[in-house]
Amino acid sequence: MYPGSARLCSALLQLPAFTASSLGSPVRRSALLRRLSPAPASCHTVCGDGMSVKPTAATAAATASSRTVGSMGSSTSRLYSALAQPEQPAPSDGGDADDVLRECEQALRGRPPRLHRRFITVQPEAPQHHSIRVMQWNILAQALGEGKDSFVRCPPDALIWAERKYLILEEILTYRPDIVCLQEVDHYFDTFQPVLGRLGYHCTFQPKPRSPCLDVEHNNGPDGCSLFVRRDRFELAGSVGLQLAASALDTNQVAIMQTLRCRATGRRLCVAVTHLKACCGWERLRSAQGAHLLQALEETAQGTSVPLLVCGDFNAEPCEDVYRRFATSGLNLDSACKLLSADGQTEPPYTTWKIRPSGEVCHTLDYIWYSRHALRVDSVLDLPTEAQIGPNRLPSYSYPSDHLSLVCDVSFREEPDRLL
């Protein structure tokens, strides 16, 4: 253990927030979709300590540099480039998650008990020693939660970052995932990268080029997708950031794709995290974004040669076209959380539940997709009941986001089925 891990975590969590105001005059993002110049010949590197690899034809469609946050100007680009240098080497013995959890418990001692959840075993005979735990979670960007999302039944002090960050870290570290896929991350550099990096995770961040967080006066920079992978479980073979495209238009949605090598088995694994366009009326755009991501995944995974894990807030219910694209693609993907249903064929009734001025919103929007021919789901974390969530829904004093985390344990099949 590194010296004084709890004190170090405390110091990291008290780092000053990175705000747009620190970069000069207030900034406003441009229109959601705008025509850009022809795509360059290469895809740009992901923010964080991600490794850049030569892009495929599909990934060449990512036109905006992921180290340049378009609406924040060139000064921001230089700052992000400085922040995005390879992170400090992880301590040889890693960090101690128990110390961080104890600090979280101390910081949250005035809050009510958290939601109680348990794992549902799908493969009781499956060996657990090489199982890979995966977490998918839209954590709710701080700027959006406080400044734009209008959770009318959530007390404002439940969203104060000084405490909410501990709720988020507690949720992550309680389940000790090997792979963490997050969306709406706007405190990457001052919280998640330093804390999870010290706990032995390889950290990568892909900001949205025109993040809505930047419309909030007191923000912490743009939100985006983050991917965290335990260094002791996986070796990073390559990492690519995508700005998702829809026909001739580049959109404001992003993804990260990484190729990993499992240190225990030597097997390769491709992991992706994404966050598709929100709101009703954008179904065709989400479908096009999904098609772009599937094409990039097919090239990165070399068809079905490399198993896939694709996590994200798709902002789409199972009836939408983008869901059908993933369910019927040649990559032979299936949704892990369907295994929570009695027949294994139905998605959970909700992964997000909130109350806004327009009324109650309860939908299934978040998914963990996996290659069913090469990976096996051993267990899945169940979802809290309506009674556990409570009448005021999410977020709350007990839970920091309007989306529930999805967690499952997967393992490599000994003999992948090639008869797809």
Image (tube, rainbow, N blue to C red):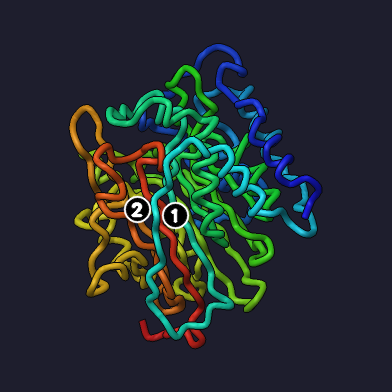
Residue at (43% x, 23% y) in the render: 29
Structural crowding at the residue carrying mark 1, measured as other residues with C-alpha within 10 Å and reported as few (<14), some (14–19) or many (≥20) = many
Question: Which element type, helix, strand or loop, lies under badge 1?
Answer: strand
Q: Residue at x 54, y 27 (%)?
A: 220
Residue 209, how many percent across, how many down? 48, 34
Q: Quadrant of the C terminus?
A: bottom left
Q: Secondary structure at mark 2?
A: strand
Residue placed under numbered mark 2 in the picture: 366
Quadrant position of the N terminus in the picture: bottom right
Picture disc at residue 136: 1
Q: Residue at x 55, y 11 (%)?
A: 25
Q: Quadrant of residue 46?
A: top right
Q: Is residue 382 visible?
A: yes
The mark nearer the N terminus, 2 or 1, is: 1
Give the amino acid at mark 1. Gln
Would residue 355 appear left or right of 199 to someone viewing this image?
Answer: left
Q: Residues within 10 Å of mark 2 (few under 14, many from 20)?
A: many
Q: Nearer the viewer, residue 114 or 399?
A: 114
- Residue sitting at x 73%, y 41%: 8
Left-right relation of 155 to 173:
left
Q: Is 1 above or below relative to 251?
A: below
Q: Residue 62: image x %, image y %?
A: 49, 45
